[in-house]
Image: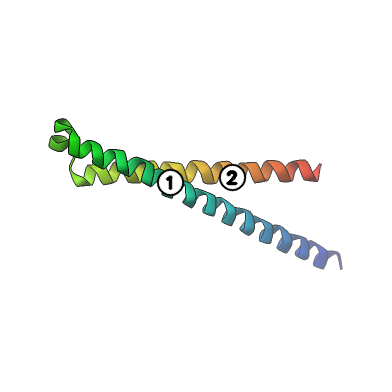
Amino acid sequence: MAKSVSLASMDQKLAMAKRYSHEGVIAGAKAAVIASIATAIPAYAYGKMSPWARTYLNPTAKALIVSTAAGMAYFVVADKTLLKIARQNSFKQT
């Protein structure tokens, strides 16, 4: 009987972990979309207006700038979301 309780407890913890990681993924994806928009507009506008940028920043460089900002935003926000949830759960268990 104790073994089934332990298995049920593990299943519950696994389901919670999946739900929390999904929340982190959703929050990170939202942040990545916002960061993409926030960096794409200035990067492409600067590329049109600045003679230096017109000369040295090709479309690949502009895309790299945007994707780097989006990737960083995704991982930072997803990590912060998971840490926030873990902190809340650690306070609930004590």
Q: Residues within 10 Å of mark 2 (few under 14, many from 20)?
A: many
Secondary element under disc 2, as helix, strand or loop, is helix
Q: Nearer the viewer, residue 85 or 13?
A: 85
| Residue for point 59% across, 45% down | 81
Amino acid at dot 1: Ile
| Residue for point 18% across, 32% down | 50
Amino acid at dot 2: Thr
* Quadrant in which the N terminus is drawn: bottom right
Residues at discs 2 and 1 in contact (Cβ within 8 Å): no
Q: Residue furthest right?
A: 1
Q: Residues within 10 Å of mark 1 (few under 14, many from 20)?
A: some
Residue mark closest to the camera, 2 vs 1: 1
Q: In the displayed structure, does residue 37 sit left or right of residue 26?
A: left
Give the x, y percent position of residue 73. 45, 42
Give the x, y percent position of residue 92. 78, 45
| Residue for point 68% across, 57% down | 16
The correct choice, above or below, for 26 with respect to 39 in the image is below
The correct choice, above or below, for 27 with respect to 87 in the image is below
Residue 82 disc label: none
Secondary element under disc 1, as helix, strand or loop, is helix
Q: In the displayed structure, does residue 80 sit left or right of residue 34?
A: right
* Quadrant in which the C terminus is drawn: top right
Determine which quarter of the picture holds residue 10.
bottom right
Residue 34 disc label: 1
> Which residue corresponds to mark 2?
81
Q: In the displayed structure, does residue 63 sit left or right of residue 56?
A: right
Determine which quarter of the picture holds residue 62.
top left
Give the x, y percent position of residue 14. 67, 60
Q: Earlier in the sequence, mark 2 or mark 1?
A: 1
The correct choice, above or below, for 6 with respect to 91 in the image is below
Calculate the distance from the C-alpha at mark 2 to the C-alpha at mark 1: 16 Å
| Residue for point 71% across, 43% down | 88
